[in-house]
Amino acid sequence: MTAGAKGAGMGSLRWTILATALLVVTVLGITLGETAMPLAEIWKGLRGEEGPAALTVRFLRAPRVLTALGAGACLGLSGALFQRLLRNPLASPDLMGFAPGAGLAMMITLAFGITLPPPLVSATGGVLAALSVAILAHRRDEGLAPLRLVLVGLGFGFTCSALAAFLMLTLPGPLALEAQRWLSGSLAARGWGHVAQIWLPGLILILLLVLQVRALSLLDLGDDLAQSLGLRAGRARMWLAATGVGLMAAGVAVAGPVAFVPLMAGPLGAAITGARRIGPALLAAALTGALITCGADLVARAAVPGVGLPLGLLTGLLGAPYLLWRLSLEIERGGL
């Protein structure tokens, strides 16, 4: 067997491992909970048969798992897109303040009784946060330096989180409890409306991203070469950034500002699959983001019987050590 054939075989095996892990977590997410159900009962529920188990599958677990998969895929894609666009593994929407900005926008609508579609609210908050961070981090002589962008984004994100916590204090008890759960990242009480809310805009944004993969590939070669090949670099970056913010906003709207999923999904997906080209790397990021989110939600609701832990708590426990490791790695390489 030639080296090329061995490499192709290993690549296929890696993709199979990732897909199998995602399938297993999805099945476990529907099977496990406060009451475990056999696969036969799950199959009955998916076929539309009646009964308590069928109702649990159709109206509680299946929508929650599908929402987790959609939100995780969108967040993972958003993180991988910004990391590729800014050529920095730390450049993800959660670290740069975009996701906390979207969360603050949602809290403002709750505090002031404004009724607007959640995806629109979170997208507006994310765009305003992105513009604010870019303005604060820009320097005329250096432009947008990646380290400054990340540091300003972290400070801006903490500010948004603090303001959101303050606004939460103004809400009545039940609404404040729900807002607190959402701010910490939660997929509790998700129904088929939430599935549509993430999958419909998510699929549209993914299609838009697919149409922009060539532009992202050209930008990867450098702005000068990309422009010599006929690409309007500034315009392409703007559309790619808007798509990334939209993907982030779609995920935040249904799951809350879940931390570290955008940061981890791209690098971990590339490490698992060995993907190097942009198209496969983005696909790996989407699958890995879905795997992290669905797996973390499964642990959050099944780890402690009778207690539903926040999704953000589990992703934080995974992401904080990863962030420290990545920071130390970048320091060693001289990237920071």
Image: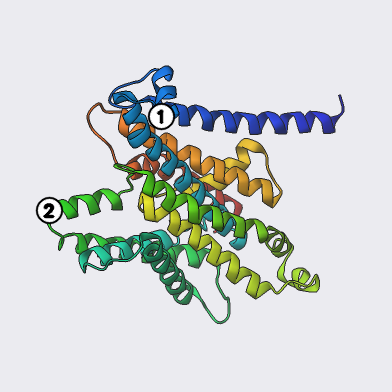
Compared across the picture, whether 275 is left or right of 324 comes to right
At x 33%, y 21%, the residue is: 36
What sort of colour scheme is used for the picture?
rainbow
In the rendered image, residue 60, in percent from the top left (x then y), is placed at 33, 35
Circle 2 or circle 1, nearest the eye: 1
Compared across the picture, whether 31 is left or right of 207 comes to left
Amino acid carrying label 1: it is Gly
How many numbered circles does the render carry? 2
The image shows residue 237, relative to residue 31, as above or below, that is below
Q: Secondary structure at mark 2?
A: helix
Instruction: Give the mark nearest the N terminus, 2 or 1.
Output: 1
Q: Secondary structure at mark 1?
A: loop
Q: Which residue is mark 1?
A: 48
Q: Which residue is mark 2?
A: 173
Residues at discs 2 and 1 in contact (Cβ within 8 Å): no
At x 36%, y 60%, the residue is: 118
